[in-house]
Amino acid sequence: MAENVPVEQGQDHAMYSVILGFVVLAVILGSVLFVFSQREDSDGDENNETPTPTAMTEPTVSPTDVPDGDITDVPTPTITVEPTSEATNEVTFELTGQPYEYSLNEIRVSQGDLVTIEFTSTDGFHDFNIDELGVASDRVNTGNTTTVQFTADQVGTFNFYCSVSNQRAQGMEGVFIVE
Ligand SMILES: [Cu+2]
């Protein structure tokens, strides 16, 4: 009779082992299936995402960089070459006026000169004008100076004169020659 107890216990152990085996198998199978399903999902996602950024990146970079570089490089050397402004010759005359004459009767320049007239009244109210060249200075009184600047763009002999009252008729004029 003493043998019955261990036999029943052994059968119980066997039953537990079988159940445990099924549970372990179920867990392993479930894990394997889960891993496979995860891989399929992740592979699908990667395949869908990969071509999209690649396709967008390549056309954006290539056309933007290449034309900008070509357009920028071409005009820059053209602008850098600028030795054309050397031709301007600047000449300055200091001129005074008094009743009824200027300190100079004749002023002579070359065509294209940039002319500056610094005109000072030493006595009375005077100005400096050349109608043909569009020159008309401010009127200045005794001790004051005014400056006019213009380009002698046309060849010829012109009169400069004072426009105050009848001072030109009284002799306040001169000759401005562009040659
Ligand atoms: Cu005058």
Image: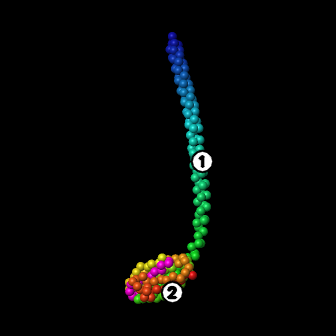
Looking at the image, tell me whether mark 2 or mark 1 is earlier in sequence order.
Answer: 1
Residue in the picture at 57% in, 38% down = 48
Residue in the picture at 59% in, 67% down = 80
Viewer-proximal residue among 31 and 90: 90
Residue in the picture at 57% in, 45% down = 56
Vertical side of 125 occupied by 72: above or below: above
Vertical side of 86 occupied by 175: above or below: below
Secondary structure state at the residue bearing disc 1: helix
Secondary structure state at the residue bearing disc 2: strand
- Residue tagged 2: 106
Mark number, residue 150: none
Vertical side of 47 occupied by 173: above or below: below
- Where residue 39 appears, as percent x and y from the top left, is 57, 34
Residue in the picture at 47% in, 78% down = 131
Residue 132, magenta (yes or no): yes
Quadrant of the image for the C terminus? bottom right
Q: Is residue 119 left or right of residue 41?
A: left
Vertical side of 119 occupied by 39: above or below: above
- Residue tagged 1: 58
Magenta part of the chain: 121-133
The answer, for residue 145, to whether it is visible in the render is no
